[in-house]
Amino acid sequence: MERYALKKMKSASNSRDLKVLNRLLVLNTIRKNGPIARYEVAKITGLTPPTVTVIVSELMKRGVVKETGAGKSNGGRRPVFLELESSAGFIFAVRLQSGEIMAALMDITGNVLESRYLKLDTEFPEAVVAAIRECLDQFIKRTGTPRERVLWCGVAFPGLIDISQSTVVRSFNLGWNKAPLGEMLSHSLSGIRVHIENISNAAALGEKVYGSGRGLPDLMYLNLSVGIGAGIILNHQVYNGTQGYAGEVGHMTLAPETGPQCLCGRYGCFEAFCGIRAVLERIKTEAPPECFEEWGVAKHRLGFDDLSIPFIRESPHVKAILADVENYIGIAIANLVSLFNIPLVILGGEMVGVLSLNAINEKVKARLFPEIGETVRVVGSVMREDPPLMGVYALVLEKVFASDQWL
Ligand SMILES: [Zn+2]
């Protein structure tokens, strides 16, 4: 008797699981292929047309799917198309870096409802979390979005992240050590689920889904900013490594003890040659005093923005230092490409604006076997949107559509 009851319960739970799976299958088919007719959904999913009709009615009743204009007829009745209802759910995406926040409220079909760039004068985790919360509060107020419809928060963050715990293990950039950012944020954002992702991984994914990496199984995004990091996509997936720390290329050694000292304490790191802070320091040390007089900039006040002024950037001392930076970037990229045989390297971060992509491509090819070098392209990011922000959105969106709990 007992065994019979158990068996019955098991089959009930199996049929419920199957129902959930079928619902997710139909929902994701509409998401990825919409606008799409019901009979096409049946064809793609392998479900019977009546089953699709029942599931679609249910999804429409829940406000997740809607009918849109009738399509072209092949002689018979004109099919009605289905697509996602954009207001069914929202995602709060954040890029957090030292001194700045970029945040956006987006719907599940990729529309940006509101976005905001915020300068931060604090790096205390509690204050940063409060600033992020204020962004969301403002978005909700301005757009009239129901708070309970904001399903997930995704954060792109520079540093070592324990993805499973949403904890920042370490960030030189913000000086954080073992900060439970996910938990703090979730608590502050009224219990919304939070996912923290390394900023370069997020950017690589953003390029893969929305940028110049569309359709490519393998690519690398190299972020050249104050810090340097890479996001590596292999076989369509972000490559995380054993601990999730893959892509920390800013601290790979390009020169032994003779190289400049890095923030991490070691010598000759990639970042110590090519990070913004390192490049500015080098110009301040190597350019003679008359250069600064000529530029009209006090030595201690030289900032990265000054390098965007052509007569400063083109002056012989700065030009020579930037050529050296291009050479080191070329060495680093050639090493990484040798390792993974990646055909596309996308450069992001402020440094790209003052460097020559042609020079970098030449340096890369010069250090690779011609068979490999011929296939490699190093390009600047041309995404109109923010790659890390879009990447973390894409990542969290997959989490939303992997479960039906929000329906
Ligand atoms: Zn280092």
Image (spheres, helix red, strand yellow):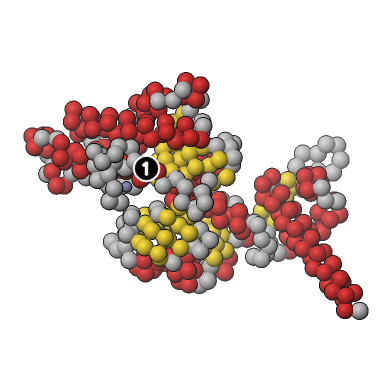
Q: Residue at x 88, y 79 (%)?
A: 2
Residue lying at the far bottom of the rendered structure: 1
Estimate the x, y position of residue 246 in percent, counting from the top left: 47, 47
Q: Residue at x 65, y 57 (%)?
A: 402
Q: Nearer the viewer, residue 267 or 305?
A: 267
Q: Quadrant of residue 355?
A: top left
Residue 158 in the image: above or below residue 220: below
Residue lying at the far top of the rendered structure: 370
Q: Residue at x 36, y 63 (%)?
A: 177
Q: Nearer the viewer, residue 52 or 355?
A: 355
Residue 259 in the image: above or below residue 97: above
Q: Nearer the viewer, residue 114 or 136?
A: 136
Residue 190 in the image: above or below residue 243: below
Q: Nearer the viewer, residue 95 or 329?
A: 329
Estimate the x, y position of residue 97 in percent, counting from the top left: 36, 55
87 left or right, relative to 34: left
240 left or right, relative to 178: right
Q: Residue at x 67, y 47 (%)?
A: 32
Estimate the x, y position of residue 101 in percent, counting from the top left: 38, 57
Q: Quadrant of residue 261?
A: top left
Residue lying at the far front of the rendered structure: 257
Q: Which residue is mark 1?
A: 252
Count residues near mark 1 (Cα–Cα under 10 Å), then give few for <14, some for 14-19, many for 20+: some
Task: Specify the quadrant that holds the C terminus.
Answer: bottom right
The amino acid on which the numbered mark 1 sits, given as a three-letter code, is Met
